[in-house]
Amino acid sequence: MSLVKLDQVHKYYGDFHVLKGIDLNIKVGEVVSIIGKSGSGKSTLLRCINGLEAYQQGGIAVDDKEVTSEDIQVRRLALSVGMIFQSFNLFPHLTVGENIMLAPTIVLKKSKQEAEKTARAMLEKVGLGDKFDRYPEKLSGGQQQRVAIARALAMNPKVLLCDEITSALDPELVGDVLKVLEQLAAEGMTLILVTHEMNFARDVGDRVVFMHQGKVWEEGNSKKLLSEPQTEELKQFIGAVL
Amino acid sequence: MIEFSNWDILRNLLLAAQWTLLLSIAAFIGGTVVALTLTAMRLTRNVVVMRIVRVYVELFQGTPLLMQMFLCFFGLSMIGYEISAWGAAILSLTLFTSAFLVEIWRGCIDTLPKGQWEASRVLGLNFLQTLRHVILPQATKVAFAPTVGFSVQVVKGTALASVIGFVELTKAGTMLNNATFEPFKVFAFVALIYFALCYPLSLCSKYLEKKYHVAR
Ligand SMILES: Nc1ncnc2c1ncn2[C@@H]1O[C@H](COP(=O)(O)OP(=O)(O)OP(=O)(O)O)[C@@H](O)[C@H]1O
Ligand SMILES: [Mg+2]
């Protein structure tokens, strides 16, 4: 059964045609890596899936519910789609624990005790059980990003969108974040990630989607696609990043 | 002719300075209340409402405070609405203060990264929840220093109330000068008192700026 379904999605920024008819079906538990050159529309695609950006043609459905960028819709969607950003976007005035508990208490109306229990469990899961009372600025980038993952997980999403979540990190911190993603994948979480980590895409991902000039240029099983690219553009791209 | 000792001059100026202080406080409180309302209006992102705020700000920032005071005092009485010098001074200073505070606070809210709004949105917070739990707690910290800094302008702005006949520090200075013919002495005292009112505010603003800039 497909959890995320895109049907001929077109998106424009003014006159600029960013997404040119994207078709995509993502099943429950699938790990899909989106790769492609800068400007090919990868972030835009993710942001359309959770309604942060409006699209002009076609259709997107998550869990059989249509996605639009209406405020109410985005909020309903937030219950099933989590998103993690390149720049973490933690709330600097709140402690790690408060960051994670904020949405569960005011959106899901959980009690404080219940929210705290979930928050501690999620922090444990990302390997930061001892950081509950710290402020984000006291953490390394890798730790902040793992807090952001815990914050998204506390809303119990069905799918997590990750937009280059290791790109802002020092190389030695990337591994910790990828390990968390790998563990989530193993537990059956559906992941859609825009990434430059080709090893991760090949070894952990099920499927790779190569975007080029606003189109899905090539897609398929991650190991096969990365070892035997069919198009000239993907060959070039793989040559450039490896 | 009556003789004025230095103490007489100073004592009379200090009495008048109370009115300067009171006028400043009233204008600042009034300005804050109006500016809060306008800021809330601006944040609704409703095009018409935002345009109204824009015009308000342009109008009161783009004309001299002195003209605003004249209009409030003489203008209102000409259209049959009697207003005291005190009332006109408070009214015009409130309008003036609010127009600047709205802009200062807008800057503070806009310096917060867009990611704060987006993270809130993808977590399912609605607009008001985002404002209350994410944006305002951060923006108010940033806003303290420039807001206190601007209060110096309000204190100095009260001097203009002297031209519509309100007896505050500047007006008292002019009156004492007319009686003593010692302009240098009188206005030196006046300046000193203004300085004594404003300097602590400047210091406070600098302190707040340091405190919250390091923290961010
Ligand atoms: N808000 C916007 N307004 C106008 N154009 C935009 C906007 N956001 C993105 N674009 C343009 O749309 C195109 C696709 O942008 P997008 O961010 O989706 O690319 P990307 O594949 O994620 O690139 P990168 O690898 O650099 O993150 C780019 O040409 C970009 O300049
Ligand atoms: Mg991008």
Image (tube, coloured by chain):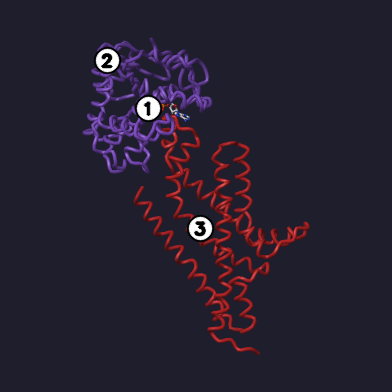
Chain colours: A purple, B red
Q: Nearer the viewer, residue A11 or A88?
A: A88
Q: Amino acid at mark 2?
A: Leu
* Residue occupied by mark 3: B150
Q: Name the element at disc 1.
A: loop
- Residue positioned 40% across, 33% down in the render: A105
Q: Quadrant of ligand 2?
A: top left
User: Horizontally, is B97 left or right of A182 in the view?
Assistant: right
Disc marking residue B13: none
Q: Amino acid at mark 3?
A: Phe
Disc marking residue A155: 1
Residue A100 lies, in percent from the top left, at: 35, 34
- Residue positioned 41% across, 16% down in the render: A4
Badge 3 and badge 2 both on one subunit: no
- Circles 1 and 3, Cβ within 8 Å, touching? The answer is no
- Residue positioned 65% across, 64% down in the render: B86
How far is the residue under mark 1 from the one under mark 3? 43 Å
Q: Amino acid at mark 1?
A: Met
How far is the residue under mark 2 from the one under mark 1? 34 Å
For label 3, the crowd category at 10 Å Cα-Cα, with few meaning under 14, some 14 to 19 and many 20 or more, is: some
Badge 2 and badge 1 both on one subunit: yes
- Residue positioned 42% across, 39% down in the render: B113
* Residue occupied by mark 2: A226
Pick whichever of labels 2 and 1 is earlier in the sequence. 1
For label 1, the crowd category at 10 Å Cα-Cα, with few meaning under 14, some 14 to 19 and many 20 or more, is: many
Q: Name the element at disc 2.
A: helix
User: Horizontally, is B39 left or right of A206 in the view?
Assistant: right
